[in-house]
Structure formats: C-alpha cells, structure tokens
Image (tube, rainbow, N blue to C red):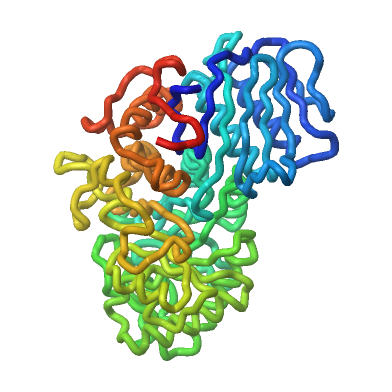
Amino acid sequence: MTRNSIIPKPQSVVATNQTFVVDEGLSIRVEEGHEAFKKEALRLAGILKNATGVGFEVEEGDKAAWFGNTILINQSKADQNLPPSGYELDIKENLLTLTASSSEGLFYGIQTLRQLLTAQVEQAGGLQLPVLIPTGTIRDWPQYEYRGMMLDVARHFFDVPTVKRVIDYLALYKMNTLHLHLSDDQGWRIEIESWPNLTTHGGSTEVGGGEGGFFTKEDYKEIVAYAGDKHITIVPEIDMPGHTNAALASYPELNCDGKATELYAGTKVGFSTLCTDKEVVYEFVDDVIREISEITPGPYFHIGGDESHSTEQEDYEYFMNRAREIVKSHGKTMIGWVEVAHAGIDETDIVQFWAKEKNALQGAKKGAKLIMSPSKHAYLDIKYNEDSPLGLTWAGLTEVDDAYNWDPVTLVEGIEKVDVLGVEAPLWAETIETLDDIEYLMFPRILGIAEIGWTVREDRRWDEYRVRLGQHRDRMKAMGIDFYESPLVPWQEEASFFMDIEMTDEGGE
C-alpha cells in the first residue's frame, strides 16, 4: 500500500507492508440490522463473485469470524471523526475492516478496494484465487460536495444503456452527480405529458439530421434509480430562454409571432428565444419543471440560461427571475449557467461557471454557490490536440495535463473555497454519436476532474498524478473503454502494488 495508483488520491495512507488474502474461505460480515450497510456488503460480494466466480456469503453480526480471513463492515463511531461521505479502510493480515458513517461512504470505500485489486477485477472471471491486498490504513473523504459530469443528450441522443454505462464510470472514480442536458435547439429529449409534441416533433431530429429520440418518463426514472443506487444524483437541465428551437418548433404559441420555427440540425448557438412577455410561456415552463421535478428525487433543477443572444437583457432578467421562482415552487434548488448571475439570484441559488470570470464573481457576491466548469480545462468536448478525430476547438485545446492543472479556488480572483460547491466536466455532443465517442473524450480527462473534486489541492501534483494515471491503462482496457493514450502519460502495464507511485503517511508530500 506504500505504492498504489488510487484515483482520486486518498486523504491519508499508512502502509504496513503485509498482505490480506482473499480466498474461498473469506467471510464478509456486516452489523446486524443495518440494511443500508448490508446492501453495500452485498455489492462488494457481487463484485468479487463476478471477478472470481466464487460466491461469498454476507453474514450479519458484530464480531469478526474466528476462522479464515474476514471483511468486516462497520458504522463509524463519533470518535473516529469521519465526515458523512468519508470512509476508513483498515487492512490487517487476517481482517479487513471498512468503516463509514453512511452507506455513501461505504460505497466509496468499496471503489478504493476495487482499485487495490488488479484490473482483472473489472472482468467476469478475471481474477484467480487467492488474491492479495496490501495491508495498511486509508482514511479518506471528499473536499467538495458536488463532483460531476454533464452529458448532452440533446445535440445527439444517447439511450438508457449508454447513460447507465457513463454512470458506472463516474461511480468508480467517486463522482456523485450526472447533469443531463435534456433540451436544446436540436432536440427535446424527455417526455412531458402536458406538452406531448415536444418529443414527438421536437425530439425527432439531432445534429446532422439523424432521427433523434427521447426518454419516456419510465426511461428517465430508470436512469435516476440506477444512478441513485450508485450514490449519484441526476440533475435535469431544460435550457431557457435560449437554446429552445426544438420547443419553438413544437409549439408556435411559444414564439412571439405565433408561428412554429423549423426543426434545426446544425450547431450554431444564440439564435432562439422563448417569447418572454407571453404568459403561456410561463405556463409552459411551470408544467415542464413540475413534471420533471416530480420524478427527480435530487435537490437540483438546472434552467440553463446561457448564450441567450436573441433575448434582450431586460427580458432575459425578467424571464430568469420568474423561472427561478417556478423552480423553487416545486421544491428544487435552481442551477443556471454563469449568465444567470445578472438576474436576481441569492444564496439559495447555484451558478455554474464556464466563462467570463466577472460573472462568476458577481454570482458569488450575491451569495450564490459556484460549480466550477472552466471551458479551457473541464470541457470534455474540447479536442486534446489538433489531430483529435472528435471534439471542438473554440476554447482552445485541452490535453490531459490542462484538464488536471487547475484549482476551483484559484481560478477566479476573489473566489474563496467557501463559495465553491464543487466541480463539473461538461461533455457537449456536437461531434459525438456513440458510447465509444463518449469514452474517447471522457477518458482519461475525467479521472483528473474527479481528483480535483475529491483531493485537497496540497496533495495534487501533475508529475505524481500522471504516473498513477498511467497505471490505469489496464483497468480502462479491462472495462472496454476506448480512451485517448496521451503522450504526456507514462502508460504501462499494471504493476504489483509494490511498484506503483509512492504515497506518504497521512496524505502529506
């Protein structure tokens, strides 16, 4: 454990240089009567069964078995000082204890345990018993509450299995939010029963003129439940008042001239707007937010607000103020792109920064929390280099080091850590159509974003991280991920835990 490739980097690692053995005699035990913890214990047993072919029973009881090696799952005590999302892995030669104050913390501990095993744990039947795990103690918790990615399903539509796969990837690296961009000029992607033409007409195309598609409410609830099982919150976004051509083409009354626009399959932005002085527009907004909120258990609703170039500033502010109140009336916290800082926001709102530092600072001065998504660093749709087959270049080029070498607090002068809710990596879909395309632009940059959201700034260094990242080559290949093999990373076959990069005691460098 003195040398390991865990991503995100844990808060502290203390090694004892022995091994814990996973063999057929392994016992998994969990505190009696704690159903949420038992569920996580069963999850761990399932991972091990898939990888080894051996079924490990989960037993309830407050003491370790007296025979064989044991994994013991406990709820933390007050004197252990673990935050709600934190965990402790204490690994001895015959007892592995995973402790947390919540099932979420246990889940994150299990992801770390996965990474302490070889990459073959990700493949059915990939591990042969016995399996060795290095001994020592890991104490760990995230520095930011919000650690997410955005997937644009509007420019190109991605189906439920594809979204679930993205959720799997985020879960392994301890990210806890998936923001779904559900509407734009090119397509409307979620069923709204009170406005059915949004999907039947507005969802019928995509960039390039493909057939598009949409999520039924049952589809969306399936995604929400799948994410929730992995402690990931779904954030729905309906972009407004701009980026709305799919809605304007579906319902002419949303236009100021009362005429439906044509469906759009291009990639230009800023040309569409809801008619902000028509009351029917606010009835529409209320219906949409209500119906989606009813099937979204998470606390957030994203109302977009970016690139509304066809909306007069006064009209924009009036609209956003009303939309903000509609969100609150349905029990959700409003998130908006950084332009919403011009509206009447306050400490109950969240501003997502992507460009224009002065707007982020304005939002913070009004008391709003910030999600940091700097386009020059965190936008996954930006090309790695000029030869990248996918992606855009409007924000420059973003190699793997560019995606890692930034900090949410030092990015904008005047912003302090107390202002920052977390980080998010958006993936816009103008140039991508398949899961392979998603993977290529996500990986390996998403691992760096995950570490920025989890690990304290003082413990992050590119030269050290790039070596750890290189050790994830086999894991990504085992998972079938089509990743970009950056020349900046020393890619290598997975070594034993004694050969990976050094981690020092208590997380210090």
Which residue: 32% across, 20% down?
492
Q: Is residue 65 left or right of residue 123?
A: right
Image-quadrant location for residue 251: bottom left
Nearest the eye: 414 or 168: 414
- Name the spot of residue 114 as percent of width and height, x first: 55, 27
Image-quadrant location for residue 491: top left
- Name the spot of residue 255 as percent of width and height, x first: 38, 83
- Name the spot of residue 49 as percent of width and height, x first: 64, 20
User: On screen, 142 above or below 416?
Assistant: above
Nearest the eye: 6 or 135: 135
- Mark yes or no: residue 339 visible: yes
User: On screen, 296 above or below 476?
Assistant: below
Image-quadrant location for residue 404: top left
Q: Is residue 148 left or right of residue 392?
A: right
- Name the spot of residue 299 as percent of width and height, x first: 60, 63
Which residue: 39% across, 85% down?
317
- Mark yes or no: residue 205 visible: no
The residue furthest left is 386
Which residue: 36% across, 31% down?
469
Which residue: 44% across, 89% down?
278
